[in-house]
Image: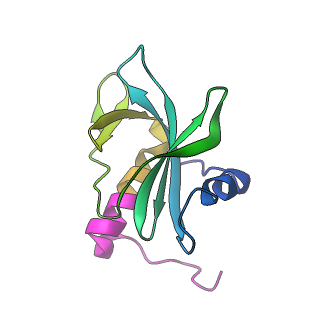
Amino acid sequence: MAMPVSASIRERCRTYLRPGDEIRYVFPVVSLPPPLTASFLVVVTDRSVTLLSTTMFGRDEPSGVWATYPRRTRLGPIVSRGGPTIEFGGMTFEVDDEYAAVVAAADAEAFTPGDLPRDPLPEL
């Protein structure tokens, strides 16, 4: 199971989004290929997929909007190239194994919502 990013990271990401955007998923990625790698946070909202650049010393500290894509941007499938990778927006990103399920869930929500399990605690 993926370790969700903290509430404080989600709040820092929210400052770079449009007013009213509802954050659905957030996960860190690293752009490839080396040696010009850079860390980003992928923020999936109800309306968009936003790629946030991060600070040089903090993989979880957003520093600005790199790019914004329509919500129906497909993030997967995950491909193994020495480590799990995804491609979108003309870039390749390495994803930690623990976030593979998050990528799959974000794509399922946008493209095959009937495949998602029902929320067991909708009142929360």
Kindly give the residue lying farthest to the right in the view shown: 8
Where residue 25 sits: x, y (%)?
Answer: 50, 58
Q: Position of residue 119 (x, y in %)?
A: 50, 77
Residue drawn at x 39%, y 59% is 106
Residue at x 69% of width, y 51% of height: 6
- Structure colour scheme: rainbow
- Residue at (26% x, 69% y) in the render: 112
Residue 27 shows in the view: yes
| Residue 1 seen by the camera | no
| Residue at the bottom extreme, as displayed | 123
Judge whether 114 appears above or below 70 on screen. Answer: below
In the image, is 21 to the left or to the right of 59?
left
Residue 86 at what x, y percent from top left?
Answer: 32, 39
Residue located 63% across and 49% down the image: 5
The magenta region covers 106-124
Residue 100 percent coordinates (x, y): 41, 45
Q: Residue 118 or 94: which is nearer the viewer?
A: 94
Asked if the magenta segment contains residue 118, the reply would be yes
Rendering quarter of residue 124: bottom right
84 lies above or below 102: above
Q: Is residue 93 magenta?
A: no
Is 80 located above or below residue 36 in the figure? below
